Image (cartoon, grey):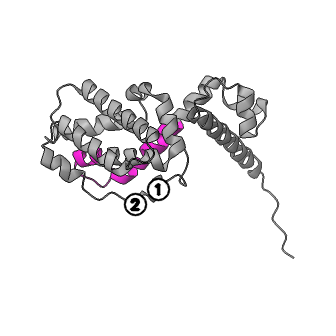
């Protein structure tokens, strides 16, 4: 019979840290489900019940429901942005990186439905957020302009157009579940590339480039 070694003196803090991490993750996941459902006025008690944690545990992590919802949205943005960075880090052409990111994000609306509903529920404030998609779009557009791939004179207007197109695409795919999401995402991306100053034939070529394996952005992946 094998005897399990006793916990060392450093194990208790590690267990406590893991428990706190699980509690925080459960609260964020519960908040995301309420945001996705459009239930922004839900009381804290209902959130803690959905997360299966005590009310006291909530206030060990967050001062208010608003702080929790902000953390839940930040988590969505960070997860998706990290996913896009992983897919595009090997691309040397910033215009192709932008196109790939937009095409993948368009497909996300079907493959990661809860995450996409959180993004759509958050709406226009995402366009000026310093996290997630907006700063990466700004980065890629700026780099593409510097490389001579895009021709943009008003960056704020360009970002507004790109963000509005993304939210509009997501809402359309949500409202029309039978629409081909890949075709719609590629069509919108191609139109945006032209608006950003790229010749139509080159925009079409970029939108025909093969995308990475999409299994990482289906709904079985980490739900944001």
Residue 101 in picture, x, y percent from top left:
34, 46
Q: Secondary structure at mark 1?
A: helix
Give the side of residue 107 with respect to residue 100, left or right: right
Is 211 located above or below residue 112 in the figure? below
Q: Secondary structure at mark 2?
A: loop
The residue positioned 81% from the left and 64% from the top of the image is: 5
Tell me, for residue 216, which label it has, or none.
1
Name the chief secondary structure element in magenta.
helix
Contact (CB < 8 A) between labels 2 and 1? yes
Q: How many marks?
A: 2
Is residue 196 among what the camera can see? no
Report if residue 94 lies within the magenta region. Answer: yes
The residue positioned 33% from the left and 51% from the top of the image is: 88
Tell me, for residue 213, which label it has, or none.
2
- Location of the C terminus by quadrant is top right
Give the side of residue 152 with respect to residue 165, left or right: left
Is 64 located above or below residue 7 in the figure? above
Dot 2, how many residues are within 10 Å of its Cα: few (below 14), some (14-19), or many (20+)?
few
| C-alpha gap between disc 2 and disc 1 | 7 Å
Is 46 located above or below residue 184 in the figure? above
Per the rendered image, the range of residues in magenta is 75-99
Is residue 50 among what the camera can see? yes
């Amino acid at each position: 019979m094998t005897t399990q070694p006793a916990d060392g003196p450093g194990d208790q803090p590690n267990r406590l840290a893991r428990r706190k991490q699980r509690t925080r993750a459960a609260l964020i996941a519960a908040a995301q489900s309420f945001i996705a459902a459009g239930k922004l006025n839900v009381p804290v008690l209902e959130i803690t019940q959905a997360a299966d944690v005590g009310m006291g545990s909530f206030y060990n992590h967050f001062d208010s429901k608003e702080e929790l919802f902000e953390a839940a949205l930040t988590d969505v943005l960070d997860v998706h942005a990290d996913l896009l960075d992983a897919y595009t880090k090997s691309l040397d052409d910033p215009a192709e990186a932008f196109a790939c990111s937009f095409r993948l994000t368009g497909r996300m609306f079907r493959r990661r439905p809860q995450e996409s509903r959180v993004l759509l529920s958050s709406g226009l404030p995402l366009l000026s957020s310093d996290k997630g998609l907006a700063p990466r779009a700004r980065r890629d557009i700026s780099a593409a302009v510097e490389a001579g791939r895009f021709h943009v004179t008003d960056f704020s207007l360009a970002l507004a157009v790109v963000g509005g197109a993304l939210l509009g695409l997501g809402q359309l795919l949500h409202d029309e579940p039978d629409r081909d999401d890949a075709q719609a995402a590629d069509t919108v991306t191609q139109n945006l590339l032209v608006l950003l100053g790229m010749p139509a034939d080159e925009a079409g070529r970029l939108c025909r480039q093969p995308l990475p394996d999409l299994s990482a952005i289906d709904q079985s992946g980490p739900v944001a």
